[in-house]
Amino acid sequence: MATHERTLAAIEAFYDAALDESLWPATLQMLTDLTGSQASTFWVLDGSENPHLPTFISINFDQKSIQQYLSGMASLDPTVRYLVAHPQQTIVHDGLLQNGRDKDTRDYDDWHERNVETRFRMVGQAHVAPAVQAGVALHRTQNAGPYEQQDIEQFGVLHPHLRRALSIGFRLGSLGAMQKLGLEWLDGNSAAVVLLDEHMRIVFTNRRAQALQSSGDGVRFSTNGIELAHRQDNEKLKLLIHQGGVMRGTRPSGKRPYGIFVTPVSGRLSALSLFRPAVCVVITDPDRQDLLPAQRLEAAFGLTGAEARLAALLAAGEDIRGAAEKLKITYGTARTRLVQIFQKTGTRRQGELIRLLLTTVVTG
């Protein structure tokens, strides 16, 4: 294969590997052959206060030596130190490193001489996020000789594509990680959470929502979205899905009604962006014992313990009289505390308060 064809193949491989890290060994082998190297690595460098390499993929290195390198020697490596100090430097090679040697550098050199056959290195990197760098390192043995100017220029043709591929891969990988964390967090929520897209189709239900539907007590999920057992409730829910708000949902079992909170999904919930949800519906069951923690409400709104316990019951779907009975206080006392809660939360009506409290359930 001609050199330019091999170069194009390597560029294509960068983009593929940036999206699927299992392809890095084959990509590294291709790059190693193209540049007349004997070994290579793909790495991610956390250049924060304690620099380390959370991702490190290598070919043609002894794995025992790699483990020693990652477990302590990497932090002494002059090239790693140079990369941390120069995150914007696109291509780094031996000629750029300082000649001065301290004890750590000598310790690294002694270890390297005993354990690693390669002697020369050329690195291409991208600064993909604050204190995060990623790139590839090419290695040559003593017999192959150092990387000359023409090698650096050849690598300079490849590097813009490497940098772009790594930036794309980092963004997509970060979104994927955020999405996973977001979904795990929603799944652990004590309320039933349902996300709808702009066409009102369901794009996500957490575990509590799935259990709620399985109970067969007035809530059903279908291709048409969320459906409530009672026609009037269903019509009201459809209205709230378009404008937001709070309602109660009657249950065929005769148990106390569900508390239902509907709101547009805020743009700040970027962890969900791959689902493109438009509406969030939160359904609470007042018969469940796992109320919104009163301590969270105390911290969030500056409530007293007594006010927070009342607020937690209201958020779970209790009305003011039922909450008073559960707390063993008079209706008048409950009303007085509710007024105090209104003042501290900046709300004026019970529906507005419940909307705020249930937002606390969703956003944590």
Image (cartoon, helix red, strand yellow):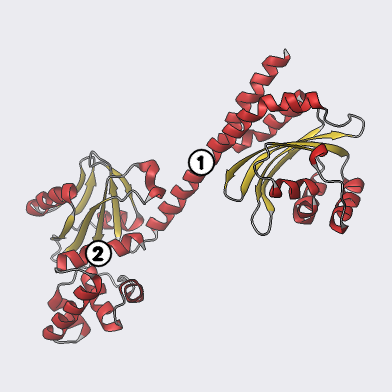
Task: Kindly identify the amino acid type of the residue bearing the numbered disc 2.
Answer: Leu
To which quarter of the image does residue 20 belong? top right
> x%, y% of residue 307?
25, 80
Q: Earlier in the sequence, mark 2 or mark 1?
A: 1
User: In the image as oriented, which residue stretches furthest toward the top?
Assistant: 2
> x%, y% of residue 79?
77, 45
Which label number is shown at residue 187? Answer: none
Q: Which residue is mark 2?
A: 356
Q: Is residue 39 left or right of residue 16?
A: right
Q: Is residue 253 visible?
A: yes
Question: Relative to the observer, which residue lies in front, 61 or 226?
Answer: 61
Question: Relative to the observer, which residue lies in front, 250 or 352?
Answer: 352
Q: Which residue is mark 1?
A: 171
State which quarter of the image contains the C terminus: bottom left
State which quarter of the image contains the N terminus: top right
From this view, report whether residue 122 is shown above or below residue 360: above
Q: Is residue 182 left or right of residue 46?
A: left
From this view, report whether residue 229 is shown above or below residue 171: below
Local crowd size for mark 2, using a 10 Å CA cut-off: few (<14), some (14–19), many (≥20): some
Residue visible at 88% across and 49% down?
A: 109
Residue visible at 31% across and 51% down?
A: 266
> x%, y% of residue 125?
67, 38
From this view, report whether residue 198 is shown above or below residue 283: above
Residue visible at 11% across and 52% down?
A: 236
Task: Kindly identify the amino acid type of the residue bearing the numbered disc 1.
Answer: Arg
Tell me the distance, in whole angstroms, between the alpha carbons under discs 2 and 1. 33 Å
To which quarter of the image does residue 202 belong? top left
CB atoms at circles 2 and 1 under 8 Å apart?
no
